[in-house]
Amino acid sequence: MTTTPGVRVRVPGKVNLELRVGPLRPDGFHTLATVFQAVSLYDDVTAMPHGRITLTVTGEQAGAVPIDDTNLAVRAATALAAWTGVEAGVALQVHKGIPVAGGMAGGSADAAAALVACDALWHTGCTRDQLTTLAADLGSDVPFPLLGGTAIGSGRGERLTSTMTRGTFHWVIALADEGLSTPAVFAELDRLRMAGGADATGVEEPQLDDALLQALRAGDAHALAARLANDLQEPACELRPALHRTLEVGCAEGALAGIVSGSGPSVAFLVDGPRAALEVAVALTASGVAGDVRRVHGPVPGARAVEAVRA
Ligand code: C5P
C-alpha cells in the first residue's frame, strides 16, 4: 500500500495588548493601531491530498464552526489554488483549541495555517511575503498568525511590524460559552461614539502608547499591566454585561490586569508568573464567571508545519 504524505500546521491564537480604534473608513473598516501577541493556545490544521477542497472540524466548540465555502480556511485554500494555478484539492482537518468567535482570531488562525499547509502540500513554493499578501485579502487578522511573536498592526490591522520583547508573559484566558460577532462589536463602538456626540468617521487617528512598547522591551509584566487598553472593551461589555464581573473577579483574585481580548468575549488576565496563573485560574473556575479557563504564555511563533502526516 502506498502512503500519501500530508502536512500538519500548528497555529497560535492572539491577544491584543493595546487596541486603538480610529475612524470608520469608506470601505466599512476602521483604522486600527494595535499590538498583537501570539499566545500558546493552538489550532492544528492538517492538509491531506484530495480531489476537491473539503473541511472537517474537531475539538472544542467544533459544532459552532461553519464547514462550507464561507469558512476562512476553505477560502484560504481556494485563494491559494487560484493564485498559483494549482488544480489539486485538499482535505483540510481543523482541530480547535482557540475559542470560536472569542476575539482571539481563531478563524483567522485557521486561514493562516491553511495557507502554510496547502503551500507545502501543493509545493507551490510561495514566499512568506506572498502568503501574507493573500492573508491580508482574506481578513484583517489573518497576517498576524502567520508571523506570530509580538507585532504592531496598522491599517485595518493587516500591516505588521514585529516588535521586540524580553522574556515570557503569562496569561490566564477566561473563555465564554458563546462568541461575539466582530462586526457587531465594531458597530456598537460606533453607536457609543455617536451617542457620545462623536461622528464615527471623524474620530482621531489611533496612536499606540510608547510606555506599553517600553514595558514589552523590558519584559516588565507590572508595567505592561498598567498599559493594557482596548477600545473594543466597552462595546463588548455593553453587548455582554457579564464580562464586567469576569474582569472584576480575575483582578480581585490576583491578576495584574484584565482585558477583553480583541472584540471579545474572551478575557485575558496578565499574571506575575505560572504560580499566580494557577491561583487566578482556580479562582475564576470556582467563581463560575468563565465558561472555561486556560493558562497560556506569549509570545510564541506563528504558523509552523509541525509534522508530515501519512494517510
Ligand atoms: O477583516 P475581517 O473580515 O476580520 O473583519 C470583519 C469585520 O470586522 C469587518 O467587516 C468590519 O465590520 C469589522 N472590522 C472593522 N475594522 C477593522 C477590522 C474589522 O470595522 N479594522
Image: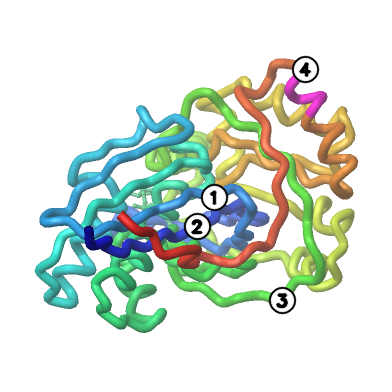
* Cα distance between the residues tagged 3 and 2: 20 Å
**Badge 2 amino acid:** Val
Q: Looking at the rendering, in which quadrant would you find the N terminus?
A: bottom left
Q: Residues within 10 Å of mark 3 (few under 14, many from 20)?
A: some
Residue 129: image x %, image y %?
Answer: 39, 81
Residue wearing tag 2:
11
Bounds of the magenta segment: 282-286
**Badge 3 amino acid:** Met
Examine the image and state in which quarter residue 261 appears: top right
Check if mark 3's residue and mark 4's residue have beta carbons within 8 Å.
Answer: no
The stretch drawn in magenta includes residue 73: no
* Cα distance between the residues tagged 2 and 4: 30 Å
**Residue 201 shows in this picture:** no
* Cα distance between the residues tagged 3 and 4: 36 Å
Q: Residues within 10 Å of mark 2 (few under 14, many from 20)?
A: many
Q: Is residue 79 above or below residue 283?
A: below
Specify the label residue 88 is tagged with: none
Residue 77: image x %, image y %?
Answer: 24, 61
Specify the label residue 42 is tagged with: 1
Check if mark 3's residue and mark 2's residue have beta carbons within 8 Å.
Answer: no
**Residue 120 shows in this picture:** yes
**Badge 4 amino acid:** Ala
Q: Residue at x 80, y 71 (%)?
A: 166
- Mark 1 or mark 4, whichever is nearer to me: 1
**Badge 1 amino acid:** Tyr
